[in-house]
Amino acid sequence: MSLVNGLPAHILLVHFVIVLVPLTALALTVGVIRPTVARRMGIALPLLALVTLLSVPLATEAGEWLERHVDGDAMVRRHAELGDGLLPWAAGLFALAVVVWWAARRGGVPVNGSASGTSHGNPWSAAPVRIAAVVLSLVVAVGAVVDVYRIGDSGAKAAWHDGFSTTATVGHGDDD
């Protein structure tokens, strides 16, 4: 996909990534910290992470097309390099979302949060496993969100660094 209504598809597809990565990171973080929430989210958590994962290569491919159709400069190249690094973070979000969903589903964690329905044979309930899952999920969630920010910031700078004036142009209704 290269153009949508005459606009480069990349500038539209990145908005999915910008929204979905932080949303998935938040859902994963809440789900791993609160297994009852993960159980309530059910299959929606890994499905959200899957859509997020699929949106990254779509935006990247459209970005590579756009890169070939704009004047190349260091800022564009930097943005492209940063963009290539997001897929592993999105894959990590997906993998962890599947694990959290599976563990909440198998774990017998009751939806109402009471301890009476907890399965004693569930390895997910062991404190070291829970702590490791929380830490790993937080690292991947924060890493993914920070990476999206860095990529977006570099893309905005590449697109706009020569595209506007800090002073208003004459005749455009700016009365300030």
Image (cartoon, rainbow, N blue to C red):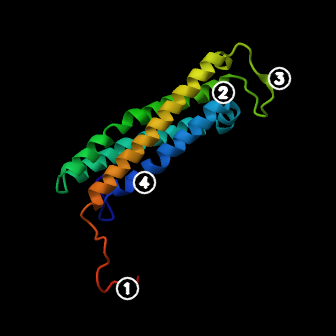
Tell me the residue at 65%/38% (across/down). Answer: 41
Q: Residues within 10 Å of mark 2 (few under 14, many from 20)?
A: some
Check residue 116 in the rendering and tell me which mark sits there, or answer none. 3
Residue tagged 1: 173
Residue tagged 4: 15
Pair 2/3: label in front: 3
Tell me the residue at 49%/31% (across/down). Answer: 139
In this rendering, is residue 144 above or below 101? below
Going by the image, does 107 lie left or right of 142? right
Secondary structure beneath label 2: helix
Q: Earlier in the sequence, mark 1 or mark 2?
A: 2
Secondary structure beneath label 3: helix
Q: Earlier in the sequence, mark 3 or mark 4?
A: 4
Type of the residue with mark 1: Gly
Pair 1/2: label in front: 1
Could you give the CA–CA distance between mark 3 and mark 4, rounded to whole angstroms? Answer: 43 Å
Secondary structure beneath label 1: loop
Could you give the CA–CA distance between mark 1 and mark 4, rounded to whole angstroms? Answer: 30 Å
Type of the residue with mark 2: Arg
